[in-house]
Amino acid sequence: MFTDSDFDAIRPYNDSEVIETLERLIKEEAFIRFAQQLFPGFSKEMIVKSLGGVNTIKEFQSNFTVRLAQHIIDHTTKGITIDGLENLDPKESYLFISDHRDIILDSALLNVMLFNNGFETTEIAIGSNLLIQPWIADLVKLNKSFVVQRNVSVRQMLTSSKLLSSYIQYALNTKKASIWIAQREGRTKDGDDRTQQSLLKMLQMGGNATFSEHFKSLRIVPVAISYEYEPCDSMKTLEVYRKETNQGYKKTPKDDLRSMIKGMVNEKGRVNFVIGKPISEMLDVIEEMDDSRDKFKALADLIDYRIHKNYKLWPDNYIAFDIVNETNEFAHKYTAEEKDLFLRHKEKKINPDDGDPERLNQIFLEIYANPVKNRLELKKPDFIVDK
């Protein structure tokens, strides 16, 4: 039987660690500067006061995290909506597998929507590569984040994957805590959302049951999140371009921190979540497949099908698709004013001094066009029974 102490290397903080951690945070000038970037006009004293009297993880989330997320919603979005909550039982725990567009916001905004609708917030998977300062590790662990080890040797990866898989199983079925995890390592840079089979293989390491029994015990719920304006579209565009034109290009920890902050403060337009139905009914069918590789591919295809089907397409997506494909196929999906606004947004985000303007524009547009392409190519796998 596992306990929290078996997962000290990766687990979130618990209530007994809150006061000591907050004492460290409020003494950390980098944390104060970070908070002031998100709350312009807040003095150090105001930030410290907002954390005063916080003794539990739930109090920290309601006093700080939820208020921060609501501030982001109020100041950088045109509203956020969520569909599919009727698919969830508030008394049950789930493994939310989501498309991944923003380092922090995907899970943070989902959690504030769950919180506002009477559900418990999720625990959040976060890569160790993002914990570039001790205060960042403290902050995310207070916010119910657990660590996914990155950039380790093959031998270490096997050990860390087993530990991670066991923790997820423990959190879901012993702690009765829901989990949020991205469908892939790192954000999608081109708008083409795909579930990595390696993620599913990791998830199976923590159990000894059959494929069907194990994944039923995880209660996987596919989640589709879509932003009208990608929070870091310009940064993603430049990253893809630099990887294409500079073989040795590699992001720095400073780039990741900048992406975290920019994602929170940049405009997003409208934001939509769709909570899919828990995956269970098709697992017995997948179980009957002969090759284990087929099983993982089938489960990944099922998750992708649900995410692509539920992904909210905005006028920007149709505009970009038409431009990329030199067509007017979806002209009925947007107005001339919406097209003009999107093109002005693109011009504002693309700096021609960064490289070949034509290629930069192409990369930028594909971020928005690929979700439409995925919807057009949406084909229900033969084994899926879906309404």
Image (cartoon, rainbow, N blue to C red):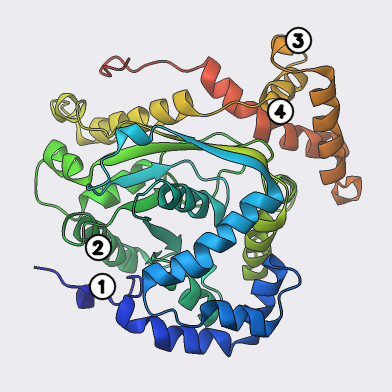
Q: Nearer the viewer, residue 130 or 338?
A: 338
Above or below, comparing residue 348 to residue 365 in the picture = below
Q: Nearer the viewer, residue 277 or 296?
A: 277
- The reply to whether dot 1 and dot 3 touch (C-beta < 8 Å) is no
Q: Amino acid at mark 2?
A: Tyr
Instruction: Please indicate whether residue 86 sits to the left or right of residue 286 in the image.
Output: right
Q: Residues within 10 Å of mark 3 (few under 14, many from 20)?
A: few
The residue tagged 2 is 167
Q: Is residue 151 visible?
A: no
Q: Is residue 1 visible?
A: yes
Label 1 vs label 4, nearer the camera:
4
Spatial separation of the CA atoms under disc 2 and disc 4: 39 Å
- Image mark count: 4
The residue tagged 1 is 7
User: Considering only order in the chain, which callout, 4 or 2, is on the residue closer to the N terminus?
Assistant: 2
The residue tagged 3 is 328
| Residue shown at 35% from the left, 48% from the top | 199
Q: Nearer the viewer, residue 371 or 200?
A: 371
